[in-house]
Image (cartoon, rainbow, N blue to C red):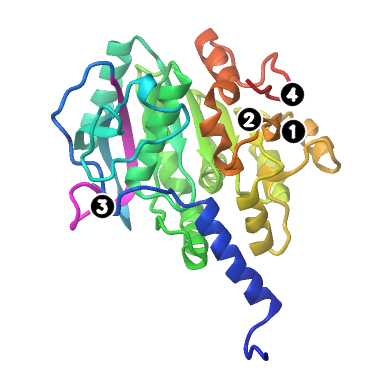
């Protein structure tokens, strides 16, 4: 059969779309947003408050979405508290999406409060959280490709809850389309590049708050492209973020050569950088194919050259998660959070920086 207008490249792209749909999309999530608060209180649930800065536009059609996939020219702020079911009713690393919002807090993730804030109220909430929880360290999380706003909120809630990380939780949500197809992937990459300056705005705001002594940036997948563009923007402006001590890259969807060049340009005063990768990350292998064969930072073999020498020269702390197994290598860090983030947890609690006296490879549980 003759396939007019079809090329090997287009067939590969079609296969890539199918794989991205399988590997990268958030499964079993409701079609409508879940951020309408529920008033039902259940004992033994955990309440996870998250402060948010976002460049998404307010949703006009679904109150449970809060913020849509459309971009906004100005940063908006919010605070959402997520109720997580008792440990006996869930598996660590998983999000129990309600079949029908708002869900049953005995077995589902449920929103218990959701409010928009202005800049002043965000600052006050940050200071209040620091005082109430006796913490002065903030963690800013940047989500990846194919994330709706509620996806990002619930994933971050799961991550910090299962990791028991002693930090104030701050989310930066950029306007990903929240769809697993080739067009959305290309769109998200463009938006991710453009979102760096907005992330700088949020980091600077947290940095200026006197209640915060230290900041850690954690990014996932394409969110690491947002993060590195933010670091480049800050460097180009001739300044540093004094309280930003650590940057953790989880399954970063960044070209390896691009990353090394960006790190070199940051200079000696850059924060410590930790790299969490999986050599069997199918999603990043697809991304590599779409990028014309350019190696992705998140699925290299760190013991092979030229990767080994380049990472060592830049003093990048590498944690190879391949041995942890599981079905979804791209999100392995969230499912195996006890193993993956134990080092971060210890160092945050002890006041150490990422990479100090850490082993090269993360160990399985």
**Percent from the top left, x then y, of residue 286?**
64, 57
Give the prevailing secondary structure in the magenta stretch.
strand
Mark 1 Cα shell of 10 Å, populated few (<14), some (14-19), many (≥20): some
Instruction: Tell which residue pokes out farthest to the front in this image.
Output: 89
Looking at the picture, does residue 155 appear above or below residue 212? Answer: below
Q: Is residue 249 left or right of residue 133?
A: right
Q: Earlier in the sequence, mark 2 or mark 1?
A: 2
Q: Residue at x 57, y 42 (%)?
A: 328
Q: Earlier in the sequence, mark 2 or mark 4?
A: 2
Q: Is residue 100 left or right of residue 262?
A: left
- Separation (CA) of disc 2 from disc 3: 37 Å
Q: Which residue is mark 1?
A: 314
Q: Which residue is mark 2?
A: 273
Q: Residue at x 45, y 47 (%)?
A: 197
Asked if one can make out residue 301 in the rendered structure from this viewpoint, the answer is: yes
Label 1: which secondary element: loop
Stretch in magenta: 45-65
Q: Which residue is mark 3?
A: 32
């Amino acid at each position: 059969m003759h396939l007019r207008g079809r090329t090997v490249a287009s067939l590969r792209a079609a296969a890539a779309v199918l794989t991205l749909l399988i590997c990268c999309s958030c499964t079993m999530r409701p079609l409508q947003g879940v951020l309408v608060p529920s008033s039902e209180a259940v004992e033994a649930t955990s309440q996870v408050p998250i402060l948010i800065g976002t460049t998404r536009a307010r949703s006009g059609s679904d109150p449970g979405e809060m913020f849509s996939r459309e971009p906004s020219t100005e940063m908006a702020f919010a605070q959402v508290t997520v109720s997580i079911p008792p440990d006996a009713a869930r598996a660590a690393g998983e999000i129990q999406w309600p079949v029908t919002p708002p869900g049953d807090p005995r077995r589902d993730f449920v929103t218990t409060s959701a409010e928009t804030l202005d800049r002043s109220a965000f600052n006050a909430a940050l200071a209040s959280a620091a005082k109430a929880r006796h913490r002065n360290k903030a963690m800013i999380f940047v989500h990846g490709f194919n994330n709706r706003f509620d996806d990002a909120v619930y994933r971050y809630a799961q991550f910090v809850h299962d990791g028991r990380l002693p930090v104030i939780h701050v989310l930066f949500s950029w306007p990903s389309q929240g769809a697993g197809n080739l067009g959305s992937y290309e769109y998200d990459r463009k938006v991710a590049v453009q979102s760096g300056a907005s992330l700088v705005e949020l980091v600077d705001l947290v940095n200026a708050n006197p209640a915060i002594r230290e900041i850690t940036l954690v990014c996932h997948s394409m969110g690491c492209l947002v993060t590195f563009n933010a670091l480049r923007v800050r460097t180009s402006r001739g300044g540093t973020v004094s309280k930003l001590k650590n940057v953790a890259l989880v399954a970063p969807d960044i070209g390896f050569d691009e990353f090394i060049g960006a790190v070199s340009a940051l200079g000696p005063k850059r924060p410590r950088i930790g790299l969490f990768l999986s050599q069997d990350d199918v999603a990043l292998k697809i991304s590599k194919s779409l990028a014309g064969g350019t190696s992705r930072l998140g699925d290299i073999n760190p013991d092979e050259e030229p990767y080994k020498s380049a990472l060592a020269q830049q003093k990048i702390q590498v944690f190879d998660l391949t041995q942890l197994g599981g079905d979804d290598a791209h999100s392995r860090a969230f499912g195996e959070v006890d193993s993956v983030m134990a080092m971060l947890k210890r160092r945050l609690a002890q006041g150490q920086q990422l990479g100090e006296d850490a082993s090269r490879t993360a160990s399985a549980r």
